[in-house]
Amino acid sequence: MVTVEFGDHHPLKPITVTDAKSRRGARKGSTSSSSSSSSSLAPDPLSSMLDGTDPLSMFAAASASEAPSLSHSSSVGDLGRKRREQEEEAAIGPDFEPWASKRGEILSRFTTTEKLSINLFMGSDKVKAPSPGSSAVSEKVRTRLEELDDQEEGSQRELLNLSQQDYANRIEELNQSLKDAWASDQKVKALKIVIQCSKLLSDTSVIQFYPSKFVLITDILDTFGRLVYERIWTMCSDPQPLPDSFTAADVNDTAKETCLNWFFKIASIRELLPRLYVEAAILKCNRFLNKSGIQETLPRLTMMIRGIGDPLVAVYARAYLCRVGMEVAPHLKESLKRNFFDLLGTFRQIHADSVQNQLVLQRVEIPQYLTLYSPAIHWILQCVAYRAPEPLLTEMMERCKTLGNNALLLNSVMWAFRAEFVAARAMDFIGMIKDCDEAGFPKHLLFGSLGRSLACADPPEPERLSILNEAWKVVTKIRSPQDYINCAEIWVEFTCRHFTKREVNTILADAIKHMTPDRAFEDAYPQLQSVIRKILTYFHDFSVLFSMERFLPFLDMFQKDSVRVEVCRAIMEVFIKYQLEPTRDPVILNALLHVCKAMHDSVNALTLEDEKRSLALLINGFISLVSFGRDFEQQLSFCVEARASFCNLEPVLMQLIHTVNQLAMETRKVMRGSHSRKTAAFVRACAAYSFITIPSLSSIFCRLSLYLLSGQVALANQCLSQADAFLKAAVSLLPEVPRTISVEGKQRSSESFLLDFINNFLAMLLVVPDHPEHGVLYLVRGLLNMVQDYAWEDNSDAKIRVYISALPLLAAMSQETYLYSIPKVDSNETLYGGDPKFIGEISKLCETLVGQVVDHLKTLGRDENARRQGALAFSLFGCLLAHADLRNNKLNQLAVNLWNLSHKHGHCDTRTSVRTLQSIKQQSQQPGMVHMSDMIQRLTLQSRT
């Protein structure tokens, strides 16, 4: 019987087989030598099949006597090395771009319209009978090998004429089949699927699709590697899971045997490419065997890739090996570098007859073929360059020069290394780019890669102008508009970072020259938008920005509405953010009016309300930053122009009305006492502006509030006729108020909004003088008539509440001196001077209103609306208590009746009632308030029943 010792094993290493009986004798202290046979040469797993043996029946470990003992100091040293290795393995940080982020870009970039095929040899499902006379172990091993061989003898699945999407779907189905087979414990079937998928990577019949094929198939390999690793990990989890920093010593024998079994199965795969890929997929499993397994395996797999004849297939195999190497052992930089240097040695194969004939057959040009290498080379160099020291870049540049400045390689080097390293050698790179052969890889792509690095890091200051000149000599000669703008867009940022508006204006002019013919700009909106964003990032002084002669003509290339709005929005956002003080610069104002007009003109019937609000907010931000100082007429002229430009955005019109009203108030304040006629004329012009603009608003409450505001401004500036016009317009608008309005997309009753407006309107009427041609209190009467005729909601008390609210106003109007007034405006207190006829008119109107309220209370009593009746009665009681002359017996008795009515059914708030009584008691103690003492005796407080 043969037993296994687990050490540094791999099926391609020399194998030592030890007799178990001799091992047992040695452990008992026998001095006889163990009978063992060792092979100093690695047995070929394929040739061993011919002599009746196989690698799975020959594995064994080196004897325990061969393992050197460790001293205490060496154990401490190993622990230190482990700790350092763990720290290095954890060195991959968020600054390393993961493969997952590149996957989508590769799939979308490398596409084909040609038909694809999948050839799979999945083996047979027949069950083989065991050979007589064979041991159970060897028979089990042989059976597994025969199952793998079945893949070449069994059923063949060939899927032809697949589209790219069909191909991706079939590969995803295979991935799912792999998971299903694994879940149903069909491990050999799962391995077959992985092997056959790996073989597909040798097929370059549709060469332009190869990078995408690599992405799809390596997804399956990743799945397989994860399943194997998790399977072995699970076997080590009894009685407790392995720690993240486990060593081979923590792994039990069963898990080790399973792990070795997987490696032996893979070593028996006859073809190089699937054997390489599948072993790389489970590279991480070496951790279960020994600490140096990964370190020893990576160089061997790297050497195996040298046996791949197709350079494109080989470079992607190296990319996959570097990917799994970075995942499991990122500190093993030598293996990464070796892959890269081996890659350099294969570049001459690109021009070999076999490759050239294949390209001719598939009608693929050399530049297109070379781009197929980019993802793989980029990835390999990213791994090599990650946190690499600066001298490594120097070494890479020297290697590039040795290869005659291979453009593809040079491009990848500039992509991979830190921008600071590349920027410091910018002129060296430019010299190397000049020496490149442009036939295989266009120089403008190289300058694009260099420009990306210079956008992130600054080159030496003395070299910056030379760098820009050398780069632009190449960029401006690019004939293809798309290639031109792709490269120019990159260099715009470098120009903005280090130069003035003069250089930026030159680039804009050159861009217009290249992109205008045949309307090439229509296919380059993303790049043109990027140019604008980069300029706005570095130029916040808009007087400088708009002094560039070609900036606005550059904006004119954005002729697609949605794109033009996005660009204009970006400009306005930057202006509002960085323009800290108001401006009157005509260059800025004219340019931004043009920009805002473009945003406004994009609004149509299909524009969403959120979009309208967003645009209006930006335009209002611009308007608020325009100031002509004391040149009020110029400010008004600007508002007139803005009204004509932005008439479809109501929030902007409202902002303009507020601006004009504020302008009128500032005019009066600044020019008080001088040029009164001119000031009055200007204020009237402002009032006319508002009076003309307000009717264009659709929101009726916006119109009402702006009429009231504008009337207040006009009255404050002694423009009585204008104030009168605004207030009459507001009163005449009241009947048009709908019962419901939309608030945040929901229908709500308009009563509360209407009552708020009427109360504000009543408060203003105290200081508004009567018009000599319209009689006494004509505005109050007009308002109350409108309230009387308004179609209020059913079962509503709003009209009665307005009547109660009007009583305090009438009481204030009857005073000899009003509570407040407006300077230089004669209110009714001055006009009538306490005239008994005026007071009599007020009294009659009060009696009418009180009568209306009392009649309504009676109606509520008949309709059994006790709660509403009590609330209104208490409200009227409070009004009489505050404003009526309660020495009048009728009013006094009315107040007592209202109190009792409000408390009749116990619906009044007890706390409010108590506080009211306390207030009346305090008033009754003041001189001349005896009538209050008499009244309080008749006020009863009833509790709820």
Image (cartoon, helix red, strand yellow):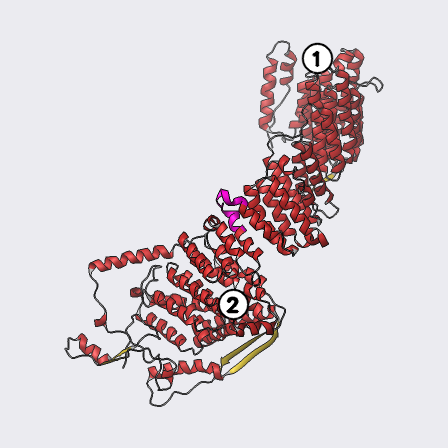
Q: Looking at this view, is 273 or 417 the one in front? A: 417
Q: Residue at x 71, y 53 (%)?
A: 517
Assign a secondary structure to mark 1. loop
Mark-to-mark CA distance, 2 and 1: 93 Å
Q: Residue at x 58, y 39 (%)?
A: 500
Find disc 1 in the rendering and name its residue. 817
List x then y, in percent, for residue 442: 58, 59
Magenta segment, which residues?
451-465
Relative side of 391 to 555, left or right = left
Q: Residue at x 55, y 79 (%)?
A: 157
Residue that lies at the very extreme toward the bottom in this rendered image: 132
Q: Residue at x 54, y 46 (%)?
A: 466
Foreground: disc 2 or disc 1: 2
Q: Earlier in the sequence, mark 2 or mark 1?
A: 2
- Mark 2: few/some/many CA within 10 Å (<14, 14-19, 20+): many
Tag of residue 214: 2
What predominant SS class does the magenta segment belong to? helix
Q: Looking at this view, is 417 or 290 the one in front? A: 417
Q: Looking at this view, is 551 or 459 the one in front? A: 459
